[in-house]
Image (cartoon, helix red, strand yellow):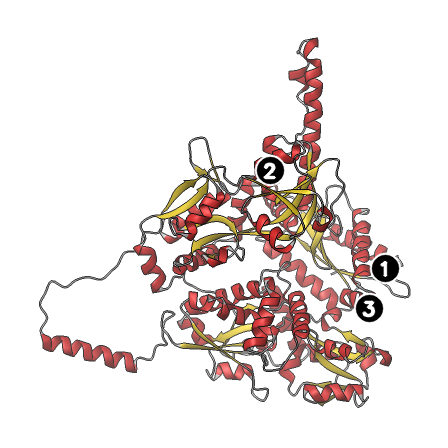
Amino acid sequence: MTCRLKSSANRSTQQISLGLLVFIFALLIVNSVFAHEQPSIADEEEIIIQLKWKHQFQFAGFYAALKQGYFADEGLNVRLKERNPSINIVDQVIRQEAHYGVADSVVILQAANHQPVVLVAAIMQYSANAIMTLEQSEIRSPQDLISRRISFYDNDSDGIDILALLATQGIRGANLIRKPWDERVDALINNDVDAIVVYVTNDPHVFRERGYDVNLIYPRDYGVSLYGDILFTHQQEAEQHPERVAAIRRAVIRGWHYALDHKEEIVDHIIEHYNTLGKSKAALMIEAHGMEALISRYTAELGQFDQGRIDYIVDLLDRLNLLESNGIGGKHLVFSSNTKGVLLTESEKAFLASLDRIKVGVEAVGYPPFEMLNDNGQYQGIAADYLARLEELLGIRFEFVQEETWLDVLENLRSKEIDLIAAAAQTPERLQYATFSSPYVRSQMVIVTRNDVDYVASIRQLQGQSIGVVADYAPDELLSRYFPELSLKHYPSTVDGLRALSVGEVDAFVDNLSVVSYLIHREGLANLKVSGQTPYVFDLSIGVRKDWPLLQTAIDKALASMSSEEHSAIYHRWIRFEVVEHVPWKNILPFIIAAVFVAMVLVYFLLQLRSKNQLLAQVSVTDKLTGTYNRHHLDHILMELFKEAKQKRQSLAIVLFDLDRFKYINDEYGHQKGDEILQQFSNIVKDNVRSTDVFGRWGGEEFLLVCPFTNTEQAIQVAEKVRLLLSEQVLIEKEKVTVSAGVASANMMPNVDALITSADKKLYLAKEKGRNRVE
């Protein structure tokens, strides 16, 4: 357990002469002037981040980090610098004209070539580069570009993935015409060139606004899947100031989460403060939605690098002789702090040391399973486990203050009579008097009804009905704000609202999926079911009184230092979907005849309860579109099967499927057709695998099949069967839909991450070799 931080200042008991004091003071001044070390994280040095281009939504996370004070929370004084297109960004950081920079995957090659740069965070999981042609040209694939004129960037580094695409397709020596963006637009419209390189979040919109239909050729549809924007720094910065690098990374990632959750607010902020390009609000909003797709934060953790993918990128570009990599590969290129524990600033340490007990407000009825008081008045639940861990990591102590209602808790936080709330959603109202940590758990906001109600497709479907909410909870604030036409009825707690729904006082009840599933099971409310979802999720965070920002930033750092296994263990300790497996007939049979009726009622109740629990479990583990398992459940099942296979020395294999050219299908035939293809592919797999296999949607157009008791050869056979069956289906007229797959075995793999990485690398290899194949 981390000891509470105390001041280390010692008072001298000796008398020091005035002359000696003057001498020491002079030495300190000289040392501060001529020291060669860079300032520490707590210093007020201005930190320059060199952006990849001019100001636009592409850098919204950085603007949000400044606007919301995330950089300031970390003790950082940051300035964002627009790009001068004539200057190489990586060179600017190497020459230390900027502390940090934003570039695409070319920086990976620079790092592999022994350039002193370190990768800090992957902002975009996918590159935004594509080749665009006019629809009327009928140029739809890379092979159609042979002998064509392609208007390209001013330098190779901005379009490294386009060069890789042309090389993999054998289109070396293409007629690349270097032009600025404005000239490229006119050149394509006037048929001076046949194709142009574009940034897909912005440029196609310009053409469509002018009335031109366009066709897009994406490198990743042809096996060239590179990262987009990457935050990087100088090697010296990473070695001498790992705390500062970690702080920059945290602030930027927090900023991006905020920007994507508040797109319109940040767009307005860009227009007011950063709009040097003079973009319209509509154009910035289109760019915002395009950026979200490329960042892909729901299929990969924001900022995350995959080592296998970095190795693949380095190897690919090296084989294509686009840049010399000296055979170093992609190892050791990503920033990793060697400092253990939570990296706090001196200000944060001093503030935590000044605290005695931190008062936590707790509602008497609780919010199970997140927080509740047991019969002995002890604080329990998911939030309680997190607070206990924070005590260990930060050396602080919490004192729990019971309040009658949630409104009392919020009012006391506003008045600073308490210091913290442990399980709360961030809302506009609460932001007026509290700051919030990054979310530590996410759960869907759902609509609960009685059994006789059909599926509720939209919250607006409840207009004219009575809807129960807990007074002053997030659903109350959000529905009141954004759906004022709805009729809300307020209850003091979730369990009161569910009971009222059960007896018909209201037509529906809206709350957190995890909470309602827990309480329906606990209270035996067998006539209730989850009938639909709302547009909102509960990002439950720790709220801290607004005048204590240093506590909030310290908590954020502590949460970030916890491993994914720690987070998962806490969640699954409290969230379980238990299903009644059988009726206790042996206890019922001895009953006398007069009790038979009671027994029959009990049996009926248990069966109803079982069906409701099954429905709740299905909602929590199922991908809504395909009906297969979702990523969260696949992670959990794979972890369990992997452990079992290792313990019992059993074989286990996985297959990672990825539908080929799926982006093209969505663009060409619409997302509705794309959704149909995802559903049809899912059905093909489900109909042709064993009942012991586990299949689900990994994210986007990727699917994962987990095969227990299966070796590599057997898994390849299954994957080939699925591939052939799909290729024989006519899902789109005049188009063949195909799939690529990567197969990996758990044998010799140290952990699940290594197993997934291995399958992922094989999948990339299948794409690289032309798609529609199993590796």
Discs 1, 3 touching: Cβ within 8 Å: no
Q: Give 607 or 753, whichever is nearer the viewer.
A: 607
For residue 38, which quarter of the picture? bottom left
Which callout, 2 or 3, points to the residue nearer the camera?
A: 2
Q: Helix, strand, or loop for circle 3?
A: helix
Amino acid type assigned to the residue bearing label 2 in the image: Gly
For residue 174, which quarter of the picture? bottom right
Mark number displayed over residue 727: 1
Q: Is residue 402 left or right of residue 601?
A: left
Spatial CA distance of label 2 from label 1 is 51 Å
Amino acid type assigned to the residue bearing label 3 in the image: Glu
Whether residue 649 is visible: no
Discs 2, 1 touching: Cβ within 8 Å: no
For residue 161, which quarter of the picture? bottom right
Q: Position of residue 549 (x, y in %)?
A: 41, 60
Q: Is residue 736 above or below residue 182?
A: above
- Sequence-wise, the earlier of marks 2 and 3 is 2
**Disc 2 marks which residue?**
497
Whether residue 541 is visible: yes
Q: Position of residue 273 (x, y in %)?
A: 54, 77
Please tell me how crowded label 1 is: few (under 14), some (14-19), or many (20+) other residues with Cα within 10 Å: some
Q: Is residue 693 above or below residue 296?
A: above
Residue in view at x 58 percent, y 63 percent: 302
Spatial CA distance of label 2 from label 3 is 47 Å
Q: Give 486 or 577, whichever is nearer the viewer.
A: 486
Q: Is residue 644 left or right of residue 551?
A: right
**Disc 3 marks which residue?**
668
Q: Helix, strand, or loop for circle 2?
A: helix
Which callout, 1 or 3, points to the residue nearer the camera?
A: 3
| Quadrant where the C terminus is found in the figure | bottom right
Q: Is residue 133 above or below residue 528?
A: below
